[in-house]
Amino acid sequence: MNPGPCNFLLLLVALDLTQYCAGSHWLQTFNTVILKHGTLEPRIIQVGYVDSIQYQGFDSKEPTARMQPRAAWMEQEPPEYWEKETAQVLRLSLTNERLLRYMMIYNEQSNEEYHTLQEVFGCNVDNDGSFLGGLYRLTYYGYEFINLNEDLSSWTAQGEAAGFLKTDLVNVGAAEGWRTYLLGECTERLLRCLDLGKETLLRSDAPRTHVTHHVRPEGNVTLRCWALGFYPADITLTWKRDGKNYTQDMELPDTRPAGDGTFQKWAAVVVPSGEELRYTCHVHHEGLPEPLTLKWEPPQTIPIIAILIGLVLGTFLVGTVVVFLVWKK
C-alpha cells in the first residue's frame, strides 16, 4: 500500500529543508502531481520556501486555482507577478503530468490508488548574495528518481525508467537549462525575497536551552542538550568531558523545523551514572551574544535534619501563639 500524497509531500519538505550551509539561505520549490485512479485530471500542488518559511503556493483544487502569497511580505508583489507565476506553474504541470503518465505506463502501475510525481529545485546563496549551489530532483513514488549533480552539468538516475529519462535530458541539454535558471532567475528571486521579508528572514532568534537527565535500564545515564525556538537554522551543539570534546556514544539528529518558523535540535550522550557533572554542552548560534555552556543541574534536596528542625520550630511557634492567645483572653 502506498502512502498518501500528502505524506509524500511532507517527507520531501522535511528532507530538503534541512540542507543549510552556515550563514546562507535557500529558496526551494516543491512540485507534486497526484493522479488518483479513475480520474482524468491530476491535482497539482506547488509550494515555495525561503529557508523554512513558505512564501507562496498553488493548489489546483482550490476554487480559484492561482498562485497565492503565503507570507505577508509577499503581498507587496504586484498582480502581474502572480499572473506570471500562475501561468508558469500551469506550464510546468503539463510537463510533469506527461512524465507521470510515462512512468505509470513503463512501470505497469496504472491500477494503483494514487500515482505521485514530485519535483524539487532550488538555489543557495551566501549572506553576501553570492551563489553557493543548486539542486534539482525528480522522484516517482519516492523511490525512483533522477538528480542533477552538484556540478550542475550531469545527472544521476535510479531505476530503469529514470535511466531512459536521463538519456533524454542529456540529449536535449537540460542540465544547462537548469544551471542557467538556478544561477539566474532562482538566485534573483531569492535575493528579492530576502529583501521583501528581511524582518522575518534575516532575524536572529536565540535558542532556549536546557539539559535533561534520563536513567537507562542498564544503569547508565542519557544527557540530552536541547536548543529550541531558534532562527536561523545554523547551530552547533557539542559535548565536552572535563573540558575536552566528547563524541563517544553521541546522538545528533538533523536540525528540524518547529512548525512556527523556528527550529529545534538536540544532542545526547550516554555517560556513567554519578559522573554527569563532568560533562558540559556547548551551544553556538548567531542569536547568542556569546556561546553558552550548560550542564545538568541535579535537583536540590533538603537534608532530613533541616526538615526535622523545621518541623520542631514550627510546632514550637504554633504552641507559643496558642498559649499567648489563651493568656490574653
Image (tube, helix red, strand yellow):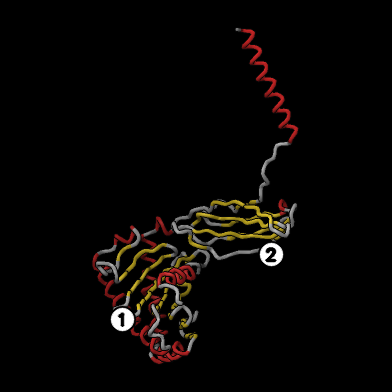
Establish if 231 lies above or below 320. Answer: below
Q: Nearer the viewer, residue 87 or 191?
A: 87
Image coordinates for residue 165, horizontal then vertical, percent: 42, 89
- The disc placed on residue 229 is none
* Total marks in image: 2
Instruction: Report the amino acid beneath label 2.
Output: Asp
* Residue 125 in view of the camera: no
Image coordinates for residue 207, horizontal then vertical, percent: 53, 53
| 198 on left or right of 219 | left
| Quarter assignment of residue 125 | bottom left
Instruction: Report the amino acid beneath label 1.
Output: Leu
Establish if 113 lies above or below 18. Answer: below
Looking at the rendering, in which quadrant would you find the C terminus?
top right
- The disc placed on residue 94 is 1
Q: Residues within 10 Å of mark 1 (few under 14, many from 20)?
A: some
Taking the spot 52% from the left edge, 53% from the top edge, the residue there is: 206
Image coordinates for residue 6, horizontal then vertical, percent: 41, 70
Image coordinates for residue 19, horizontal then vertical, percent: 50, 69
Taking the spot 70% from the left edge, 20% from the top edge, the residue there is: 316
Taking the spot 57% from the left edge, 52% from the top edge, the residue there is: 209
- The residue beneath circle 2 is 249
